[in-house]
Image (cartoon, helix red, strand yellow):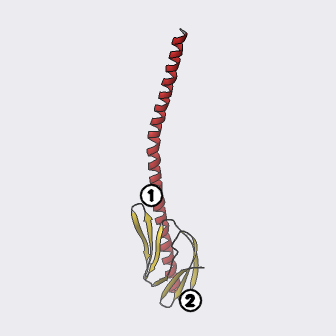
Amino acid sequence: MFLTKGVILLVSRGQFAMEYLAVLGITLLLIVPIAVIVYTYSSVSNEQISQQQALQIARKLVDTAEAVYYFGAPTKTTLKLQFPSYIKNATILQNTILFVMETTHGDSDVFAETKINLTGSLPQSSGLYEIRVQALENGVNISVVE
């Protein structure tokens, strides 16, 4: 009789271990895909937020450039701007401020245009920068304050 109880006890322990492993396996099968989906959506969301921040910066620079241009030379002002992550390139092209943003689907252009002539340069990486916007005789110069 004692031997029979020991065998039953061993079978019971073995069954418990197998059930535990099965529950653990099913739990991992559910958690891993959910974690991947959450990571993917958060990455895309961060890219979209950075693109919107870059668009706000471009519009603010254009609005400020137009304001100082219409006041006339030598009007100037300084802006403190937080440049977002995912900036691949920031360029001033005649009357356009252009940010090329890195995304999971390739590069994306974010820009703002104006009717006035723009010159100068912008920071090429993320961070907090002081940007000087100064009216000239034939347009506006935008540059980073050293």
Numbered mark located on residue 74 in the image: 2
In this rendering, the count of numbered labels is 2
Residue ranking furthest to the left: 105
Residue 100 on image: x %, y %? 44, 70
Residue 10 on image: x %, y %? 52, 20
Q: Residues within 10 Å of mark 1 (few under 14, many from 20)?
A: some
As displayed, is residue 125 above or below residue 19? below
The answer to which of 127 and 51 lies nearer the viewer is: 127
Q: Quadrant of residue 6?
A: top right
Q: Quadrant of residue 102?
A: bottom left
Q: Residues within 10 Å of mark 2 (few under 14, many from 20)?
A: few
The residue at 45%/85% (across/down) is: 117
Residue 7 on image: x %, y %? 51, 16
Residue ranking furthest to the right: 146
Residue ranking furthest to the bottom: 137
The residue at 47%/37% (across/down) is: 27
As displayed, is residue 33 above or below residue 62? above
CA distance separating discs 1 and 2: 43 Å
**Left or right: where 18 falls relative to 145:** left
The answer to which of 49 and 25 lies nearer the viewer is: 25
For badge 1, the amino acid type reads Val
Residue ranking furthest to the top: 1
Residue 69 on image: x %, y %? 50, 85
Which quadrant does the C terminus fall into? bottom right
The residue at 53%/13% (across/down) is: 5
The residue at 56%/89% (across/down) is: 74
Of circles 1 and 2, which is in front? Answer: 1
Q: Secondary structure at mark 2?
A: loop
Q: Which residue is mark 1?
A: 44
The answer to which of 102 and 76 lies nearer the viewer is: 102
For badge 2, the amino acid type reads Pro
